[in-house]
Amino acid sequence: MTNDLSGLIDRLSLKPSLSELEDILRKLVADGFTSQPTSIQLKAAASLISHVLPDLYFSLDGSCKHLISEIFTSIVGIGNLASRIQMLTLGKDPQVAVLLEVLMDVLQVGSVEKLVLQARGNRVELKEIEKMFFKGKLLGILNEASPIAEQTTSHNLATFLDIKQYSRWLSTEILTMSESCPVSSITPFVTSLLSLHATASLEFLGLFCSSNNMPYLLQLYTQLTPIAKRSFISRNLVAYISRIPVSGSDSQVISFAYLLSQFNVRMDMAHLMRANVTLSDDRVIIALGLLLSQDTRVLGDTFEHLLAIWSDASFVKASPLTTQQDYSKLILVFVYYLPQSEIQRFLKSPVFLEGISTRLGSFSNNVKSLGMVLADKMCEKAGESSIFSTTKEQELELFGEIRFIETAAFERQGTVLWESLEVSKPVPTNHQTVIPPQSGSLAAKGSNRLKLERMVIDSDDESSDDDDPTVTAAVKPAKPVYVHDLLSYLTTAKTHPQAYDRVSMALTIAPTLIRQKARFGQEVMQYYEALTKCFVGMSDEYGTDDFEKKKLNGLVAMVVALPTAVPQLLVRLLMAGDYSLQQRLAILSSISLGARELRGYQDGTVTESYVKQLFPTKLLPEQLHKQFVVFNKETDSEDHQSLLFGVDAIANEIQDGLLQAAKQELENHLVPAGKVLRISRNLVRQKEAQKTPPVANNYTKIAGKAFFFPLVAAWNKLGGGINIGHYSPVLSGHYVKTLALLLHAAYPSSPDLADMIGEMLHLITGLRKTMRTEDLPVLEAMLTAVLIVIDCCDGQWLAQTYQAEVTELQSWIEATWEGITEPKVNSMAAGVVIKLNGVMEQYQEALIRGFM
């Protein structure tokens, strides 16, 4: 039989006619080709790929193509196609289009199920299937090949080019195998898919977290190893729950608790708490508290474990403030569900008392407040008088408003309400955002007004063609005057006849209109979430001039208009949204540029985007107004910052200023003894700075809470950065540089400045352990951050408070700066070494004076 098949395959290399080819293919398929030895399958695949497909495939009829698909429907056949496509892609060979067409014909619904059934439990083949589909090999190959063949293939490649659609397809394939394949064979596929990408995890759970599919998900879960179970709960399931939109009802949070209970999370609650302590979603924390309230012993053990971590002196000193705040909130929630007798016991425990004492001795006022507020809340729940008499305002400032749910409501509901667990659809990027309706007559007026279009005709133009009946006058859309109109223009469908004009006009006028409306009424507040998501998700579909710059300026305007709400929304989008590198850079840039504007800095990138004027209805008619007001038309027109939205240019300016001081310090140190300097350049710089006129500062009071700490918390929750593959250093560098600019703008009057410095140092020292010296964007950002930290505080205080961090950074930079090949970064590193040496010398001199 094998010899017969081998003979048939040899005939393929002789370039048979179409009728002969069909005859050969039918004989191969009739003999159960996919069950033949691997050597035969390899030989057939190689012969078809080399001698038949390039010349004949597009001319074959449907029956022949179907036969070829059957031959290639094996892990050997698909693997050969994928490997040859990958090889041809490197040389940009047009034959990629033919093989891609064959592969798309093979990969139909249920194709993965066929491969698993063919494997018959063979571990080697199952591993190959896992690697090809569920670990992303096929996804990577097709993404590289698509630019060459996308225009010639008859298939829609979107499923295999977009991670969301690809994950949905694989999740559906897993579901189709529920009745035909053993669970033990499918479990490795689930583990790999969940690890492929955050989006893959969300798509998988979005399909399986339903009343119909949950039993099968639980079967898969039981087959996971203990470590995989931990990972599934803490990294996947909890992240999925956090993405479910807030409904405002207690039944949703209770449903979270019952959903978690199906996976028996109480058995390993301590690990779950440690893994998810940085959760920003109070609903999940409350759900865990409700779940644990059903078992007082487990609740008490978990609380004791968390309290021991929270009270540890090294944790208080070395952990970021955001992490300490998250632990404190978690403990506060558990206190609500603990029996009063248990709280009284913990109040007297040495561990708790030691933790409070350690926090009271901290340099940070926020760390002290965490201990004081938590102690008072525990006293309140224990029925005892408070110790520190903290206020409700202090509690809200540290923890926000926490809405607790009574255990009685949990017991009454008794099950999961699946309709409350539906994940909202992401904001579309093709201008189809749904706009919430306005209320009352204003909505009706607005909708009628949007139908009016203003004719723009120059009546004084002698060459006007108005009298020519063959020429149609250009009609331009009316300028939007409400935020609702602005959002409508930005989300105009591509089919609209004035789509380009409406979008272009909206992008141009947005920075001015948003700033005007922010000072009057609640319209910006009403639409801020939809408008912010629209700006972030927009793509340039019309070739608009300076599109990215205009979109960024719209985001900056939103940050300036609502500085306590928009930055935190942007951080959530940065973490959860499936956005491109460019969009994520824009999110970070808008946060830093908006903060600088609130601080009073005039960055040309931003100031040129809007007109500084009062609200139009508060002005006299235009001609009369001009008689009383002289406009200042001076602008920073020459400051066109394009690299990374202007943020790099701002950072470079700050670097130059700080390094110039370090350079002068080195020159002063090298001046021969006895030479008299007439005046120090540092003094000149300080005097020049004093001449700067005072500006409005709406940033420093909210710098930590609204801007800096949410970004740091997101960084910590993501494990020290956002991994997007090859471009991760660019994004991580921009992230760190954004934090550095926020810190720079907070100096000198932010009440959270000391804690911001500490968080910055913790982040840099943590990043140092994982980064590579060749990641120049990250290295430059870290050096910039160190320069700004040194500039924002007294050197003696810095060395005394963060001696370990400063010493670690000093040793690291001294050991690596000479090996940095890029001249600018090398020069920066040398300057930072000088600065750090100066800080440590200050500290050592202070110590010597103290002993004398």
Image (cartoon, rainbow, N blue to C red):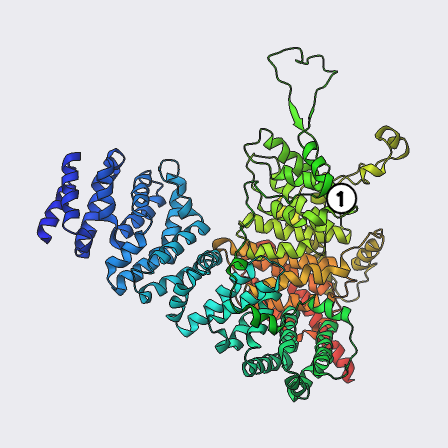
In the image, what residue occupies the spot 40% across and 48% down? 160
In-image side of 323 versus 462 (left or right): left
Classify 603 as above or below 248: above
Residue 318 in the image, given as x and y percentages of width and height: 63, 75
Residue located beneath label 1 in the image: 517
Res 747 seen here: no
Classify 23 as above or below 847: above
Residue 651 in the image, given as x and y percentages of width and height: 67, 53
Quarter holding residue 75: bottom left
Tell me the quarter of the image containing the C terminus: bottom right
Q: Amino acid at mark 1?
A: Lys
Per the image, label 1 sits on a secondary structure element best described as helix
Residue furthest front as drawn: 412
Instruction: Pick whichever, 308 or 174, lies toward us.
Output: 174
Classify 142 as above or below 251: above
In the image, what residue occupies the spot 73% across and 39% down? 442
